[in-house]
Amino acid sequence: MIDLGTGNNNKINWALKDKQEFIDIIETVYRGARKGRGLVIAPK
């Protein structure tokens, strides 16, 4: 789970496996933000 809220909760605190994993996370957050959602769930 990633909490990208305000305060000290806006970070990823584990090592990513590869560049594609980072891209997938960013795409999911971007798509949710474009729809105005505060919570998004990545399909896996």
Image (tube, rainbow, N blue to C red):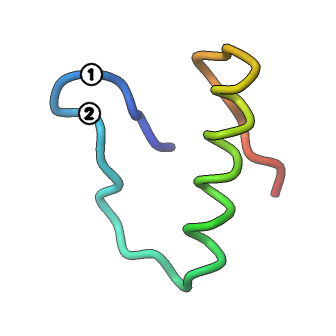
Residue at the extreme front: 34
Residue at the extreme bottom: 18
Labels 2, 1: front one: 1
Which label belongs to residue 6?
A: 1
Name the residue located 29 percent from the left edge and 38 percent from the top edge: 10
Q: Amino acid at mark 1?
A: Thr
- The CA span between labels 2 and 1 is 6 Å
Q: Point out residue 16 in the picture as x, y percentages from the top left corner.
A: 46, 75
Name the residue located 61 percent from the left edge and 55 percent from the top edge: 25
In the displayed structure, 20 sits above or below 3; it is: below
Snapshot quadrant of residue 15? bottom left
Give the structural element (helix, strand or loop) at label 2: helix
Which label belongs to residue 38?
A: none
Residue at the extreme left: 8
Give the structural element (helix, strand or loop) at label 1: loop
Q: Nearer the viewer, residue 33 or 17?
A: 33
Q: Which residue is mark 2?
A: 9
Task: Assess disc 2: are there few (<14), some (14-19) or many (≥20) residues with their C-alpha within 10 Å of its C-alpha.
Answer: few
Task: Assess disc 1: are there few (<14), some (14-19) or many (≥20) residues with their C-alpha within 10 Å of its C-alpha.
Answer: few
Q: Is residue 15 left or right of residue 22?
A: left
Q: Amino acid at mark 2?
A: Asn
Name the residue located 59 percent from the left edge and 53 percent from the top edge: 26
User: Are the residues at dot 2 and dot 1 in contact (C-beta closer than 8 Å)?
Assistant: yes
